[in-house]
Image (cartoon, rainbow, N blue to C red):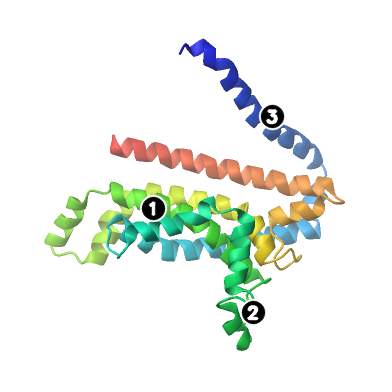
Amino acid sequence: MKAGSVRIPAFLLVCFIVAPLIGLAVRGSQALRDPSLLTSPIVLEALRISALTCSSAMIVIVVTGTPLAYLLARRSIPMAPIIDTLIDLPIVLPPVVAGLSLLLAFGRVGLIGRNLDMVGIQIGFTTFAVVLAQIFVAAPLYIRSARAGFESVDTRLEQVSLTLGASPFRTFMRITLPLSAPSLTAGLALALARALGEFGATLMFAGNLPGMTQTMPLGIMTLMENDLNSALAIAIILLAISCALLGCLRLFGLKRKSFHA
């Protein structure tokens, strides 16, 4: 196939992807000429909720997802392929279905939630529900990237460290973790981007309660009804964060390539 014959459709696709982004950037920059938009109560509350829930979700994902990714990379747990497939499922699951699944598990009449409700603990439609929704949809992205990073580490280096008397934990901290750090960081950036943009599962499981569960994407939906400029202000913030996270991904991708080269 000649290069010239594929340039036109390729160019059209690029234009289709870039045009909405340019439109958002131009219209959003016009809206941001009014600085008061960024200080309106609904915008500030949405920013606060997103910052609180996303940071909490990332801590849980890193603390629990890192050892899980390592075990999957080393095939150190029974039925690792099945577990790996189940962990990947939220990536392809429709967001509304993900939210419904969480509600049926942790809601007041859910499999686990009904028992918690009996002792006065309610998860659904709370800020904690937002965190759980973000963990559910974002954790697989971190685990996949972290697992790939651990698999890229030469196990002979770990064996040498163990032979020299280092404990498994020290070997992990001094050998495995530094060598896989670019993949872990890239996975964290992907997970953070996914958590920040989470909409459907949060709406189903946590609702859209201002000051409690209304994250930035939900704030955009609410503001679109009567305050387009404020909605654009939040959208521009999310666009800027997404660009920054994408830049981090490209940076650590280059570092991984240079390391393997």
Q: Nearer the viewer, residue 86 or 3?
A: 86
The amino acid marked with disc number 3 is Ala
Q: Which mark is residue 107?
A: none
**Image coordinates for residue 199, horizontal then vertical, percent:** 66, 55
Q: Is residue 69 visible?
A: no
Q: Nearer the viewer, mark 2 or mark 3?
A: 2
**In 3D space, how far apart are the residues under numbered discs 2 and 1 (Cα atoms)?**
32 Å
**In 3D space, how far apart are the residues under numbered discs 2 and 3 (Cα atoms)?**
44 Å
User: Dot 3 corresponds to which residue?
Assistant: 19
**Image coordinates for residue 147, horizontal then vertical, percent:** 36, 53
The amino acid marked with disc number 2 is Gln
Q: Nearer the viewer, residue 112 or 25?
A: 112
**Image coordinates for residue 75, horizontal then vertical, percent:** 28, 59
Q: Is label 3 in a helix, a strand or a loop?
A: helix
The amino acid marked with disc number 1 is Ala
User: Dot 1 corresponds to which residue?
Assistant: 146
Instruction: Pick whichever of labels 2 and 3 is earlier in the sequence.
Output: 3
Callout 3: few (<14), some (14-19), or many (20+) C-alpha neighbours within 10 Å?
few
Callout 2: few (<14), some (14-19), or many (20+) C-alpha neighbours within 10 Å?
some
